[in-house]
Image (cartoon, grey):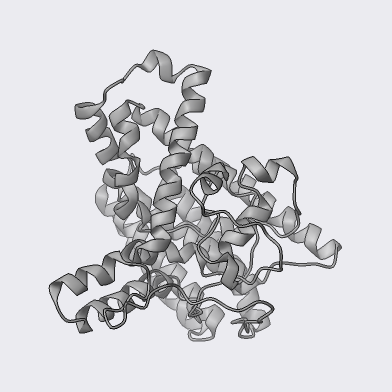
Amino acid sequence: MHKTLVLAFPVFALLVLAEFIYGWVRGRNTYRLNDAISSLSQGLLSQVVAVFTRLFQIGLYSMVYRHLAFFPSQAFWITWEGWVAAIVFFDFCDYWLHRMSHQSAILWAAHVVHHQSQDFNFSTALRQESAYMILGWVFYTPMAIIGVPPFIFGVTGLAVLLYQIWIHTEHIGKLGWFDFVFSSPSNHRVHHAINKQYIDRNYGGLLVIWDRMFGSFVEEREPCVYGTRPLLQSWDPLWAVVSVYWALAKDVWFTRGLSNKMRVLLMPPGWKPEGNAYGRPAIGSGSLVRRYDPPMSRDAIWFSCLQFSFLLLVTAFLLWNAALLTSLQSGLLATFIIAGLWFLGGVIQGRLRIRHVLFIEILLIFFGLIFF
């Protein structure tokens, strides 16, 4: 799977470039360099983490399949009917994981990264969560129990994930009957919006029929405002991942009683024992939210583009050779990538100086080459 994603990197790049050019030509650009790099950095970070979390990505699923599968018939699942059934089954399980990720604080802390961008474009689609499967793998165990083979599970999951790239755009309007059945740009814009009437709606990844069946569908009617409440005012990729966990940990610490502490984790984000107030903050109709958009110098712009391109190549090398590298080599590469992404966020935010970053990275490369 890692190699498949590496081969898809150029396709992702072309899609992002094509959407940017289209928006620029039409006078409706939906990209900002700082936000796009922040989103793409989360995508790289999630793939680096995936190299070390195969137990949760596929290992535990394979274990359940091996011991509990009721109908492990390879002959059926490799037919076209089997593939369609597996994709629909995966999407159904994914719907419930996605829905619970908005209704349980501890799952929301893992999922929130995908919603932090205030822009909505193809780079937002690549803003993937790093800790999601560590907590969410259990939602897919019904597929293993029924008997969907691990390989089929992996491919269907990748297919549903790749499908969702194109629905992260503001340049495609409503699509008639298609919007009624499938997750579409219009339906998914609603899901990312923080408008009051749109909060926690339209969870479907491939099919929107689950939302219609289980009462979570809302049609897009007014312009969407994107991001999270409170707004993440940082380009630090590590802080983006841990900030909500940190806030959640503080809520648990200051909440009295073990029962209430557990409920803080399991109830909707923001739940408090006093008055049982809960729910993610929203904005009213027609409200505006100020964008987090600190200025970038010309040097920072050039450095950011080159730094991200370099880290993309290093990540591709890690993913392509993950099975051949020693644990030490993989760990060193992952550490360098994560540090590089943190440096990148610091430069974009104006917190770090380019010459200091380059000096540290040269030292890291020099010492790292000793182990290769």
Q: Residue at x 44, y 53 (%)?
A: 98
Residue 262 visible in image: yes
> What is the count of numbered marks?
0
Going by the image, does 363 lie left or right of 260?
right
Going by the image, does 253 lie left or right of 276?
left
Q: Residue at x 64, y 80 (%)?
A: 299
Q: Give 216 or 121, whichever is nearer the viewer.
A: 216
Going by the image, does 259 lie left or right of 299?
left
- Residue 201, position in %: x, y? 53, 59
> Which image quarter: residue 220?
bottom right
- Residue 290, position in %: x, y? 63, 84
Q: Is residue 239 above or below residue 172?
A: below
> Which image quarter: residue 139?
top left
- Residue 69, position in %: x, y? 26, 26
Locate the N terminus by quadrant: top left
Residue 365 visible in image: no
Q: Residue at x 38, y 29 (%)?
A: 151
- Residue 40, position in %: x, y? 54, 61
- State the residue lying farthest toward the top: 75
Q: Give 206 or 217, whichever is nearer the viewer.
A: 217
Q: Residue at x 75, y 46 (%)?
A: 175
Going by the image, does 52 lie left or right of 121?
left
Q: Give 81 or 37, whichever is nearer the viewer.
A: 81
Q: Give 276 or 19, whichever is nearer the viewer.
A: 276
Q: Is residue 317 above or below residue 359?
A: above
- State the residue lying farthest toward the right: 26
